[in-house]
Image (cartoon, coloured by chain):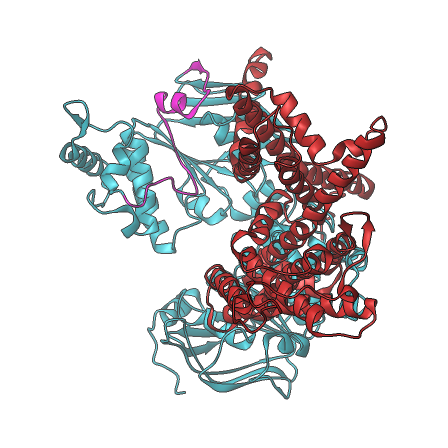
Chain colours: A cyan, B red
Amino acid sequence: MVSSESSLLELRGITKRFPGVVANDGVDFDLKRGEVHALLGENGAGKSTLMNVLYGLYQPDEGEIRVNGKPAEIRSPKDAIDLGIGMVHQHFMLIPVMTVAENIVLATEPTRGGVLLDYEAAVDRVEQIARTFKFAIDPRARVESIGVGQQQRVEILKALYRGADILILDEPTAVLTPQETKELFGILRSLTNEGMSVIFISHKLNEVLEIADRVTVLRRGKTIETLPREGATQAQLAKLMVGREVLLRVDKKPAEPGEPLLSVENLSVSDERGLEAVRGVSFEVRAGEIVGIAGVDGNGQSELIDAITGLTKIESGEMRVGTHDITRESARQRLDEGVGHIPQDRQRRGLVLDFSLAENLGLHDYRKEPNSRYGFLFPARLISWARRVLKAFDVRGGGPETLASALSGGNQQKVVIAREVERDPRVLIAGQPTRGLDVGAIEFVHRRLVEERDEGRAVLLVSLELEEILSLSDRILVIYEGRIVGEYGPDVSEEELGVAMTGGTREVAA
Amino acid sequence: MTVTPPAPAPEKDEVYERRARIYERAGGALIPLAATVLAFLIGGLVVLITGHNPVAAYKAIFEGAGFNWILPWVQGDERTEAARDLQQTLRVATPLMLTALAVAFAFRCGLFNIGGQGQYWLGFIAALWVGTHIQGLSRPLHVILGIAAGIAGGALWGGIAGLLRATVGAHEVITTIMLNWIAIFGGQYLYEGGGPLQGAVAALPRSDVLDGSARLWIIWPAYLHAGFLVAIAALLVYYVILNRTTLGYEVRAVGFSPEAARYSGIGVRRSYFLALAISGSFAGLAGAVDVLGFKYAVDTSDFATNFVGFTGIAVALLGRNKAVGIFFASILFAALSTGTSSRQLDPEIFEPALAADLSTMIQALVIFFVGAEFLIVSVWGARRYLRVRPASREKPAL
């Protein structure tokens, strides 16, 4: 690769091997002054490894790093900081009980008489930097009392305070709300206007296209291509990232709804604090249709799912699967009645991470023959059954006896879906089924949900992603403050839904 | 649909998986072993500082525990004595295995059962009652009844803590500790002067001696009783319940992730209750085999000096809550205690008063190092990190 004169940073032929894996295989990457350069790739493509090499956390086995045209040896984060490289990790490294200013000046704090912290000077300096880069932040606030978006700003300020002019952001939007993401992008623009350069790691195509000047795509540890944002499309990037055509739009036939399989009538549920979270909700999901529930997070979606699956007590109302009343049944009875559930949080609720895949797949059917008899469990049968299921669902990264925690997010989700679908449920409830997944895995999950619909199941999809709701649902219900405030067909516009989700339409009479 | 690239050959996957499992198991044994070795080294250093010969001291403990019995050249009187010492070691290890299981089983359900001591006493008292108050039974029947009573007593004590946890959410650490004291003081009350279960001699604060028909058989004269075999069987039962029953599956699921277990319809509260009740029955069994095996009676002073339930916590920790690990850990702890008892140890080599301290110190160090596992692991990781760097510099840059 020919590097231009103006490159601030160049990585050439970086190779990093771990036992059994080549995480980076001759990767080239360069960064120009004043640009946002996105590093795009699926989970496990080698993005984080490359940045850890740049930040001195790993030593490359081969390759060269040049900063300002001079070869640089970066053996520790301290070397990286001295070269003007700052990194904001996905998980913040802040001390919660200290103030913003204290966190920022930590380890290089201004002192009085050589020993005492000059707190006022620290606050002054932080304010000064914040003003230069147009950050809105209170230096005297305690870190534990500010939001996630603000904490991220503290991390960025910390890097700037240490003299960084190259900023590495590792999946910075993963923890942010859409509003906070917008604010972050504003900050990144003012940083680049001031001559800073940003490496933006992500697997989200739309964000990359919004903020980056150039995009470098990594796949299986190799640089696939570096291209300018102008002219790049989501489909093109997805193809580069996954290595094959990816269907970003879900291909599906019109629904052929049958009889109602899930009926909810006048359901009211209180949340943990005893406040009414779901207020008199009624709807039906029929065989062979996907009903999407759209809404801003925290409008009663979680409580609604927990109520239908029997995981929380309800205040009033009725629920039926087919004609069978499940209102007073336990979670287990409902499972047996044919309610499949893909939980919102697969790591905490969908899987026992310290269980093997076979044990995870058996979480519902371990107590049925042939997996067990008279209370005795037959692990060998669970394993051979799991081997078949894992193959059918193309789960990669491990066999039946691999621990669930060892799998990537997409493969973990495949295991959850496999478990729920293999029981042949009549109703399938999916809570944010693609959260945190990359495009290849999202495609799989979406295709699978449509296939399940076509099998004649009633699918209830709850998602915060409007795009997902719009591309999958045959009918869309909007939930706002615990009430269903509107019902729409699949061709409703995003704007119209957006307005309804924020309470913009009149409530539908209960 | 586009064809996806072929997955790696399944045989390769299986080989890798098998190897990973072996590593995992070996790694599990590595830390406790390293901790033990380290503890003995430091203990030896202390012996050295006090002006004694550590090699001689450890040899004396080894022989005091009767381990020299397995050496073929030990013959005659020496062999007889070694046999007796080894019998004692195994006899001491017996209740330790069981109280360790009481800790381990609850732990696999995510619970800390600190109540092994109280559950032990309940089992002890129940078995003793059967042995002293029921007469005219054949020996097998009487023994089985005594053991069953012990299990039931322990299960009751563990079950109370389990019930409190399951219904009102009272933390089992607090309740089991409180139940320990109820058992200890309750036991003293039962057998003290005028107590309801005090023995026939009014002047002595102790129970009657149980019937011959309730005594466990001696399997290796003169000291080792059949309780040792019962404990081995219990290790097996522990393994089977955990890994080969639906109950054990539920217990492990709850232990690893109560939320995920709840989401898949497993009764988390029910698991808490059952886990503590089963834990209690292991500890109760420990009490039963102790009293039916060789103690035969109890004195109120025993309640203040017996710590077998607490030692079980340390044994479970060292044994990593695994059946095999608990077996070896209990033998180690028992050997340290019999090997340093003043009767066994030659005062020429080590003062008896110091010997017991040495054994306590080694036990404490073992636990300390097992507990500090993360420290050892991170030191190990740092060492690897330091080693990688110079190697990478030698390679030519591209």
Span of residues in magenta: A69-97
Tell me: A268 left or right of B166. Answer: left
Q: Is residue A330 above or below residue B121?
A: below
Q: Is residue B326 above or below residue A425?
A: above
Q: Residue at x 63, y 61 (%)?
A: B279
Say whether residue A290 is visible.
Answer: yes
Nearer to me, A321 or B53: B53
Q: Does residue A84 show up magenta in the picture?
A: yes
Q: Residue at x 68, y 66 (%)?
A: B127
Q: Is residue A501 above or below residue B334?
A: below
Say whether residue A256 is visible.
Answer: no
What is the count of numbered marks?
Answer: 0
Q: Residue B88 lies in what quarter of the image?
A: top right
Residue B6, given in percent of the width and then of the height, sits at 76, 43
Residue B313, given in percent of the width and then of the height, sits at 57, 50
Nearer to me, B108 or B284: B284
